[in-house]
Image (spheres, rainbow, N blue to C red):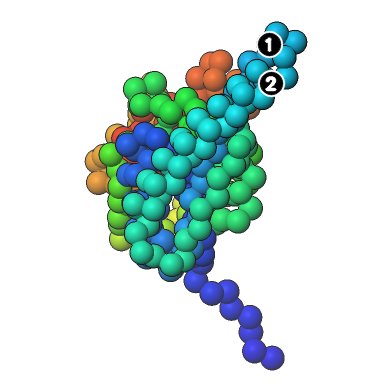
Amino acid sequence: MTPLTDPAPGYASLAVHFDLTPAARDRGRLAVDLADRFGAHVIGLAAEQMLLPIYGDLGGPHVAATIAEDEQGRVEEELAGAYAAFKDVVGSRNDVEWRQALQEPSRQVIANARAADLIVLGRRSSKDAVDVNLGVAPGAVTLECGRPVLIAPPGVDRLSARSIVIAWKDTREARRAVRDALPLLLRAETVVVVTSSGSFRDESAEDVAAFLARHGVNSRPEVRAGEISSIADEIIDAADEIGSDLIVAGAYGHSRTREWMFGGVTRSLLETSPIPLLLSH
Protein backbone atom coordinates (compact mmCIF):
# COMPACT_ATOMS: atom_id res chain seq x y z
CA MET A 1 0.00 0.00 0.00
CA THR A 2 1.31 3.44 -0.91
CA PRO A 3 1.74 5.54 2.25
CA LEU A 4 -0.41 8.64 2.47
CA THR A 5 1.48 11.91 2.43
CA ASP A 6 0.08 15.35 3.08
CA PRO A 7 0.76 17.98 0.42
CA ALA A 8 2.67 21.06 1.52
CA PRO A 9 0.19 23.30 3.32
CA GLY A 10 -0.88 26.48 1.61
CA TYR A 11 -3.65 29.02 1.38
CA ALA A 12 -6.04 28.28 -1.47
CA SER A 13 -8.43 31.15 -0.76
CA LEU A 14 -7.96 34.53 0.93
CA ALA A 15 -10.73 36.91 1.99
CA VAL A 16 -9.88 40.59 2.44
CA HIS A 17 -12.13 43.26 3.91
CA PHE A 18 -12.59 46.62 2.20
CA ASP A 19 -13.93 49.90 3.50
CA LEU A 20 -13.42 53.52 2.41
CA THR A 21 -10.19 54.25 4.32
CA PRO A 22 -6.89 54.55 2.39
CA ALA A 23 -5.60 51.56 4.38
CA ALA A 24 -8.12 49.30 2.59
CA ARG A 25 -6.09 49.52 -0.60
CA ASP A 26 -2.90 48.78 1.36
CA ARG A 27 -4.22 45.55 2.84
CA GLY A 28 -5.84 44.69 -0.48
CA ARG A 29 -2.44 44.84 -2.18
CA LEU A 30 -0.96 42.78 0.65
CA ALA A 31 -3.66 40.13 0.19
CA VAL A 32 -3.23 40.05 -3.59
CA ASP A 33 0.54 39.70 -3.24
CA LEU A 34 0.05 36.75 -0.87
CA ALA A 35 -2.52 35.23 -3.22
CA ASP A 36 -0.07 35.48 -6.12
CA ARG A 37 2.57 33.65 -4.09
CA PHE A 38 0.21 30.85 -3.07
CA GLY A 39 -1.85 30.71 -6.27
CA ALA A 40 -4.89 31.55 -4.16
CA HIS A 41 -8.38 32.79 -4.93
CA VAL A 42 -9.18 36.29 -3.59
CA ILE A 43 -12.55 37.23 -2.11
CA GLY A 44 -13.24 40.92 -1.52
CA LEU A 45 -15.72 41.69 1.26
CA ALA A 46 -17.68 44.79 2.22
CA ALA A 47 -20.93 45.37 4.07
CA GLU A 48 -22.89 48.13 5.71
CA GLN A 49 -26.01 48.10 7.81
CA MET A 50 -28.82 50.47 6.93
CA LEU A 51 -29.59 52.92 9.74
CA LEU A 52 -33.27 53.77 9.78
CA PRO A 53 -34.72 56.19 12.34
CA ILE A 54 -37.86 55.14 14.19
CA TYR A 55 -40.56 57.72 13.71
CA GLY A 56 -43.65 55.72 14.62
CA ASP A 57 -46.57 57.06 12.64
CA LEU A 58 -44.99 60.48 12.18
CA GLY A 59 -45.13 61.39 8.51
CA GLY A 60 -46.94 58.25 7.43
CA PRO A 61 -45.75 55.26 5.40
CA HIS A 62 -44.79 57.31 2.33
CA VAL A 63 -42.29 59.38 4.33
CA ALA A 64 -40.86 56.24 5.95
CA ALA A 65 -40.47 54.60 2.53
CA THR A 66 -38.67 57.67 1.18
CA ILE A 67 -36.27 57.70 4.14
CA ALA A 68 -35.54 53.99 3.66
CA GLU A 69 -34.95 54.48 -0.06
CA ASP A 70 -32.57 57.38 0.57
CA GLU A 71 -30.67 55.38 3.19
CA GLN A 72 -30.35 52.37 0.89
CA GLY A 73 -29.03 54.64 -1.85
CA ARG A 74 -26.41 56.08 0.50
CA VAL A 75 -25.28 52.63 1.64
CA GLU A 76 -25.10 51.27 -1.90
CA GLU A 77 -23.02 54.28 -2.95
CA GLU A 78 -20.51 53.58 -0.17
CA LEU A 79 -20.39 49.89 -1.07
CA ALA A 80 -19.75 50.90 -4.68
CA GLY A 81 -16.77 52.92 -3.44
CA ALA A 82 -15.40 49.86 -1.63
CA TYR A 83 -15.89 47.77 -4.78
CA ALA A 84 -14.03 50.37 -6.84
CA ALA A 85 -11.08 50.09 -4.43
CA PHE A 86 -11.17 46.29 -4.77
CA LYS A 87 -11.21 46.49 -8.57
CA ASP A 88 -8.32 48.94 -8.52
CA VAL A 89 -6.27 46.54 -6.39
CA VAL A 90 -7.00 43.25 -8.17
CA GLY A 91 -6.66 44.72 -11.66
CA SER A 92 -7.12 42.19 -14.45
CA ARG A 93 -6.73 39.07 -12.28
CA ASN A 94 -9.33 36.39 -12.99
CA ASP A 95 -9.36 34.30 -9.82
CA VAL A 96 -11.20 36.89 -7.74
CA GLU A 97 -14.74 37.57 -6.58
CA TRP A 98 -16.62 40.32 -4.77
CA ARG A 99 -19.19 39.84 -2.02
CA GLN A 100 -21.17 42.69 -0.50
CA ALA A 101 -24.20 42.82 1.74
CA LEU A 102 -26.59 45.09 3.60
CA GLN A 103 -25.42 43.72 6.93
CA GLU A 104 -23.34 44.57 9.98
CA PRO A 105 -19.76 44.44 8.57
CA SER A 106 -18.15 42.18 11.18
CA ARG A 107 -21.00 39.67 10.87
CA GLN A 108 -20.53 39.58 7.10
CA VAL A 109 -16.82 38.80 7.44
CA ILE A 110 -17.51 36.10 10.04
CA ALA A 111 -20.15 34.49 7.81
CA ASN A 112 -17.93 34.48 4.72
CA ALA A 113 -14.90 33.12 6.58
CA ARG A 114 -16.25 29.68 5.67
CA ALA A 115 -15.03 30.29 2.10
CA ALA A 116 -11.43 31.22 2.95
CA ASP A 117 -8.26 29.81 4.53
CA LEU A 118 -7.11 33.21 5.76
CA ILE A 119 -8.91 36.48 6.53
CA VAL A 120 -7.09 39.78 5.96
CA LEU A 121 -8.30 42.76 8.01
CA GLY A 122 -7.05 46.22 8.85
CA ARG A 123 -5.83 47.29 12.26
CA ARG A 124 -8.32 49.37 14.22
CA SER A 125 -6.37 51.06 16.98
CA SER A 126 -7.15 54.37 18.67
CA LYS A 127 -4.64 56.15 16.39
CA ASP A 128 -5.93 54.76 13.07
CA ALA A 129 -8.47 56.26 10.69
CA VAL A 130 -11.71 54.31 11.12
CA ASP A 131 -14.63 53.86 8.76
CA VAL A 132 -17.54 53.85 11.21
CA ASN A 133 -19.99 52.55 8.59
CA LEU A 134 -18.07 49.81 6.76
CA GLY A 135 -15.33 49.09 9.32
CA VAL A 136 -15.01 45.82 11.23
CA ALA A 137 -13.81 44.93 14.72
CA PRO A 138 -10.73 42.68 14.28
CA GLY A 139 -11.00 41.24 17.78
CA ALA A 140 -14.60 40.15 17.35
CA VAL A 141 -13.88 38.60 13.95
CA THR A 142 -10.84 36.73 15.30
CA LEU A 143 -12.90 35.31 18.16
CA GLU A 144 -15.77 34.06 16.03
CA CYS A 145 -14.66 33.36 12.47
CA GLY A 146 -12.89 30.02 13.04
CA ARG A 147 -10.06 31.00 10.69
CA PRO A 148 -6.64 32.61 11.14
CA VAL A 149 -6.82 36.38 10.77
CA LEU A 150 -4.02 38.49 9.32
CA ILE A 151 -4.25 42.05 10.66
CA ALA A 152 -2.32 44.70 8.75
CA PRO A 153 -1.49 48.19 10.06
CA PRO A 154 -2.14 51.18 7.77
CA GLY A 155 0.58 51.74 5.19
CA VAL A 156 1.65 48.08 5.03
CA ASP A 157 0.94 46.78 1.53
CA ARG A 158 3.31 43.81 1.38
CA LEU A 159 4.29 40.97 3.67
CA SER A 160 7.61 39.31 2.90
CA ALA A 161 7.36 36.98 5.95
CA ARG A 162 11.02 36.06 5.49
CA SER A 163 11.51 36.53 9.23
CA ILE A 164 8.70 35.59 11.62
CA VAL A 165 8.32 35.79 15.39
CA ILE A 166 6.02 33.32 17.11
CA ALA A 167 4.72 34.80 20.35
CA TRP A 168 4.60 31.56 22.29
CA LYS A 169 2.60 30.69 25.37
CA ASP A 170 1.55 27.10 25.92
CA THR A 171 -2.15 27.59 25.22
CA ARG A 172 -4.69 26.11 22.85
CA GLU A 173 -4.84 29.39 20.92
CA ALA A 174 -1.06 29.60 20.41
CA ARG A 175 -0.88 25.97 19.27
CA ARG A 176 -3.55 26.63 16.70
CA ALA A 177 -1.82 29.80 15.52
CA VAL A 178 1.42 27.89 14.87
CA ARG A 179 -0.44 25.30 12.81
CA ASP A 180 -2.43 27.96 10.93
CA ALA A 181 0.76 29.85 10.06
CA LEU A 182 2.60 26.82 8.62
CA PRO A 183 2.24 27.91 4.97
CA LEU A 184 4.12 31.12 5.80
CA LEU A 185 6.53 29.51 8.27
CA LEU A 186 7.63 26.98 5.64
CA ARG A 187 8.66 29.82 3.33
CA ALA A 188 10.42 31.89 5.99
CA GLU A 189 14.19 32.15 6.33
CA THR A 190 14.14 32.94 10.06
CA VAL A 191 11.57 31.75 12.61
CA VAL A 192 12.02 32.51 16.30
CA VAL A 193 9.74 31.08 18.99
CA VAL A 194 9.76 33.84 21.61
CA THR A 195 8.49 33.16 25.10
CA SER A 196 8.85 34.70 28.54
CA SER A 197 9.89 32.59 31.49
CA GLY A 198 11.39 32.79 34.94
CA SER A 199 14.23 30.54 33.76
CA PHE A 200 16.45 30.42 30.69
CA ARG A 201 14.78 27.31 29.29
CA ASP A 202 11.22 26.63 28.24
CA GLU A 203 10.44 23.03 27.30
CA SER A 204 7.20 23.96 25.56
CA ALA A 205 9.01 26.40 23.25
CA GLU A 206 11.61 23.72 22.52
CA ASP A 207 8.78 21.31 21.66
CA VAL A 208 7.36 23.86 19.22
CA ALA A 209 10.74 24.24 17.52
CA ALA A 210 11.00 20.44 17.24
CA PHE A 211 7.44 20.22 15.88
CA LEU A 212 8.26 22.83 13.25
CA ALA A 213 11.50 21.05 12.32
CA ARG A 214 9.52 17.90 11.54
CA HIS A 215 7.46 19.98 9.14
CA GLY A 216 10.57 21.38 7.47
CA VAL A 217 10.68 24.72 9.28
CA ASN A 218 14.04 25.82 10.64
CA SER A 219 13.34 27.66 13.90
CA ARG A 220 14.86 28.33 17.29
CA PRO A 221 13.38 29.07 20.71
CA GLU A 222 14.27 32.30 22.48
CA VAL A 223 13.40 32.78 26.14
CA ARG A 224 13.00 36.29 27.51
CA ALA A 225 13.82 35.79 31.17
CA GLY A 226 13.50 38.18 34.06
CA GLU A 227 10.94 40.81 34.97
CA ILE A 228 8.83 41.95 32.01
CA SER A 229 6.46 44.89 32.38
CA SER A 230 4.61 44.35 29.09
CA ILE A 231 4.60 41.06 27.22
CA ALA A 232 3.21 42.73 24.09
CA ASP A 233 6.03 45.31 24.09
CA GLU A 234 8.55 42.51 24.62
CA ILE A 235 7.18 40.63 21.60
CA ILE A 236 7.25 43.75 19.43
CA ASP A 237 10.81 44.53 20.59
CA ALA A 238 11.88 40.97 19.75
CA ALA A 239 10.40 41.28 16.26
CA ASP A 240 12.22 44.57 15.76
CA GLU A 241 15.55 43.15 16.94
CA ILE A 242 15.22 40.09 14.70
CA GLY A 243 14.00 42.13 11.72
CA SER A 244 10.67 40.33 11.46
CA ASP A 245 7.67 41.68 9.61
CA LEU A 246 5.12 39.21 11.03
CA ILE A 247 4.09 38.16 14.54
CA VAL A 248 2.17 34.88 14.95
CA ALA A 249 0.16 34.63 18.16
CA GLY A 250 -2.78 32.97 19.81
CA ALA A 251 -5.61 35.42 20.47
CA TYR A 252 -7.67 35.89 23.62
CA GLY A 253 -6.36 33.14 25.86
CA HIS A 254 -8.45 34.86 28.53
CA SER A 255 -12.03 35.93 27.88
CA ARG A 256 -12.31 38.97 25.64
CA THR A 257 -14.30 40.80 28.32
CA ARG A 258 -11.49 40.31 30.81
CA GLU A 259 -8.90 41.45 28.24
CA TRP A 260 -10.75 44.67 27.48
CA MET A 261 -11.50 45.41 31.14
CA PHE A 262 -8.07 44.71 32.57
CA GLY A 263 -5.82 44.74 29.53
CA GLY A 264 -4.19 41.78 27.84
CA VAL A 265 -1.55 40.75 25.32
CA THR A 266 -4.00 40.43 22.42
CA ARG A 267 -5.51 43.82 23.10
CA SER A 268 -2.08 45.45 23.35
CA LEU A 269 -0.80 43.82 20.16
CA LEU A 270 -3.91 44.92 18.26
CA GLU A 271 -3.42 48.45 19.53
CA THR A 272 0.33 48.92 19.10
CA SER A 273 1.96 46.41 16.73
CA PRO A 274 3.64 48.25 13.83
CA ILE A 275 3.84 45.02 11.79
CA PRO A 276 1.15 42.53 10.71
CA LEU A 277 -0.23 39.98 13.15
CA LEU A 278 -1.44 36.50 12.32
CA LEU A 279 -3.90 35.62 15.09
CA SER A 280 -5.86 32.45 15.79
CA HIS A 281 -8.40 31.71 18.49
Compared with 117, 240 (above or below) is: above
Question: On the picture, is 107 further left or further right than 233?
Answer: right
Q: Within 10 angstroms of label 2, few (less than 14), some, or many (20 or more) residues?
A: few
The quadrant where residue 80 appears:
top left
| Tag 2 near tag 1, CB within 8 Å | yes
Q: Quadrant of the N terminus?
A: bottom right
Q: What amino acid is found at the position of numbered circle 2 in the picture? A: His
Q: Which residue is mark 2?
A: 62
Provide residue 79's location: percent of width, then percent of height. Answer: 48, 39
Residue at the image point whose x is 64% and y is 45% from the top: 111
Question: On the picture, is 43 further left or further right than 122?
Answer: right
Q: What amino acid is found at the position of numbered circle 1 in the picture? A: Gly
Residue at the image point whose x is 47% and y is 25% from the top: 132
Mark 2: which secondary structure?
A: helix
Mark 1: which secondary structure?
A: loop
In the image, farthest residue toward the top: 58
Q: Nearer the viewer, residue 149 or 254?
A: 149
Q: Is residue 16 visible?
A: yes
Q: Which residue is mark 1?
A: 59
Provide residue 258's location: percent of width, then percent of height. Answer: 60, 20
Provide residue 127's location: percent of width, then percent of height. Answer: 34, 22
